[in-house]
Image: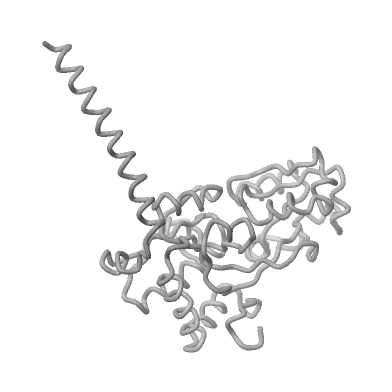
Amino acid sequence: MKRKNLFTLLILIITAVTLTGCSDVSVGKRANQADNWSRLKKRGYVTIGVDDTFVPMGFRQKNGKLVGYDIDLAKAVFKLYGLKVSFQTIDWSMNTTELKNGTIDLIWNGFTKTPARKAKVAFSKTYLYSEQVLVSLRKNKIKTYTDMTNKTLGAQTGSSGYNDIMAQPKVLKNRIKDHDPVLYDSFTNAFIDLNAGRIQGLLIDSSYSDYYIARQKDPNNFISVKGAFPKDAFGVGMRKSDHTLQRKINAGLDKLAKNGTLAKINRKWFGNNANSPLLPNN
C-alpha cells in the first residue's frame, strides 16, 4: 500500500514539473509574439534584467540596495507611465535568453548595440555613449595594445568588450597569451585578479573603469588605454514584438532630456563626463 502511494506521489511530482516547464515555454512564446504593453500596464510593473555588479550602471551597495545610472533612468522613464520597475539579477551571458523566455521584459544595464544583438532583440534609441578601454596597473607598463603581446588579458563573459576581441582579432586576440582572454562573470572579480597580478590587462567599458578607478585609494596606480575599438552605444533591449513598449521608452527618454531629468542623472553618476546623444552639446 505504501509502495503504491509512493508511486502515485512520484507521478504527481513528475506531472507538476512537466506542466511547469510547459507553462514557462508557453509564457515565453506568447510574450515573444505579442505587443505586451497592455499586459504590462494591467500588471503595473515591468521586469528589467541587470548585472548587479556593473558600476555605475547598476550595482549593489554594501547594504544590498541596488543603485546606478540605469536604475535611476529606468525608474524615471516608467514613472511617466505610472509603472513600477522590478529589477532582476541575471547571468549577463544569458540576457537575451532570459528575454526570450519571458523571465524579464527588458535588458537595461549598459547594454551595447551590436549587429549580433540586433538580430535577436529590438533596441531603444541610444541614450549614452561609452567605449572599451584597456586597463592595467601602471607598474605593468602597458601603454599600447601592442604591449599586451604574450600577456594575459581579462574580459567579462558575454560583454561587448569580449565581442570586440573576437570580432577584431588583430587588435588583441592574436597578441595575448594563448590567443584568448580569461573570462569573468563580473568585472569585480576581474579587477581582483588584475590587482593580484594574475592578469596584466582588462578590456572593460570606460563607464565602469572610470568609476572604479576614481574610487580607489590611489587612482594613479592604474592606466587606461583608449581608442582601438569603436564607441559603444547603450540602448534598452526588448522583444521585437514590443513595438509600443519601444515607442514609449523612446518618448520617455526624449521627455526626460527636455525636462532636465536626464542631465541631472548624468551629472549624478558621471559629473560632466557623460556623453549622451539626447542632450545638446554632446
Vertical side of 189 occupied by 15: above or below = above
For the residue pair 249 and 217, the one nearer the viewer reads as 249
Instruction: Specify the color scheme.
Output: one colour
x%, y% of residue 207? 64, 66
x%, y% of residue 172? 81, 51
Q: Residue furthest left?
A: 1
Q: Quadrant of residue 247?
A: bottom left
Q: Is residue 153 left or right of residue 145?
A: left
x%, y% of residue 9? 19, 23
Quadrant of image for the N terminus: top left
Vertical side of 280 occupied by 190: above or below = above
Residue under the point 41% across and 60% down: 105
Quadrant of image for the C terminus: bottom right
Q: Is residue 117 left or right of residue 26?
A: right
For the residue pair 18 and 71, the one nearer the viewer reads as 18
For the residue pair 39 and 208, the one nearer the viewer reads as 39
x%, y% of residue 115? 64, 60
Residue under the point 46% across and 67% down: 71
Please count the marks in the image.
Answer: 0
Residue under the point 35% across and 68% down: 37
Residue under the point 68% across and 51% down: 162
Vertical side of 233 occupied by 159: above or below = above
